[in-house]
Image (tube, helix red, strand yellow):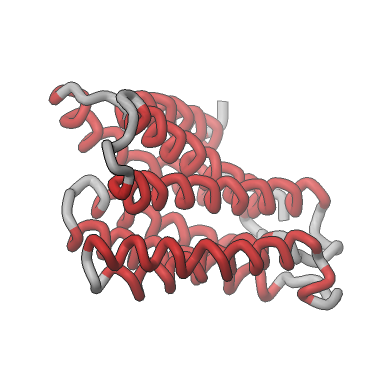
Amino acid sequence: MRASTRLKLGYLAAAALDTWLSGSSLRAARAARFVTKPALMPLLASSFATSGRATGSPLRTTTLIGQAFGWGGDIALLGHGTRSFAVGAGSFGVGHAAYISGFVRQRSAAPFFASSSTRTAVGLWAVAGPAMALAAARQERALGPAVLGYTGLLAGTFTTACHLDSSLPASSRRLTGLGAGLFLLSDTVLGVRQFLLPLLPFGPPPGLDAALERIVMGSYTAAQLLLAEGATRA
């Protein structure tokens, strides 16, 4: 078995374990995440970097940068409070900027807004982005602009991932678009959990917070894997 495949299997195992641990309230589970979560991106990046298929990928460098800053965001979000959240969002934001720069270089010649996915994503961001930012600002004023900017980058990742040139293999374009979509789902659920649920008069129903956290981590780890697979096949 090749080293790249072994590392990918290690990533899958770590992702499954961390996703399960993320929804547990046990102290031991929270402590274990200081091992499992920081291991995610190094395993995936190492698998991607050692893959022979990815050597000539036009998305190789930007994907590795995206993974590196994803790792920084993962570590920051192990902490709690406004500062940890802001640092984590900033790190992920740089990662999204890297992904976007790679996708833009491989963009389709078709008009940007000709795609229904692009129009849908921009429309949803125009409605949900400011609403999420306002909810974040109610918790901490400084978070409002940060969340608005981050949601814009997130929407940019999705729209550019769905606008790749047809010269790239179809499997690469499908996996990249799906990965970006799952990233959008993950962070949308995270925003709902972080900023909207606390606004409920009686708080979230029992068990909902744990379920949402597992959805966040499950979709996030799948998103990073699919983006890497899409880049490998490019």
Front residue of 131 and 112: 131
Q: Position of residue 205 (x, y in %)?
A: 33, 29
Q: Nearer the viewer, residue 225 or 57?
A: 225
226 relative to 66 in the view: left or right: right
| Picture residue at 67% right of the left edge, 52% below the top | 176
Which residue occupies 54% across, 53% down? Answer: 184
On screen, residue 89 above or below 108: above
Q: Is residue 14 visible?
A: no
Residue 116 visible from this viewpoint: yes
State which quarter of the image contains the N terminus: top right
Q: Position of residue 101 (x, y in %)?
A: 58, 73
Nearest the eye: 131 or 89: 131
State the residue at coordinates (66%, 59%). 57
Q: Judge whether 73 appears above or below 202 on screen.
A: below
Q: Position of residue 167 (x, y in %)?
A: 85, 63
Task: Write the residue at 71% across / 61% down.
Answer: 120
Quadrant of the snapshot with the C terminus: bottom right
Q: Position of residue 91 (x, y in %)?
A: 34, 64
The mark total stands at 0
Q: Is residue 14 left or right of residue 1?
A: left
- State the residue lying farthest toward the front: 201
152 vs 57, nearest the viewer: 152
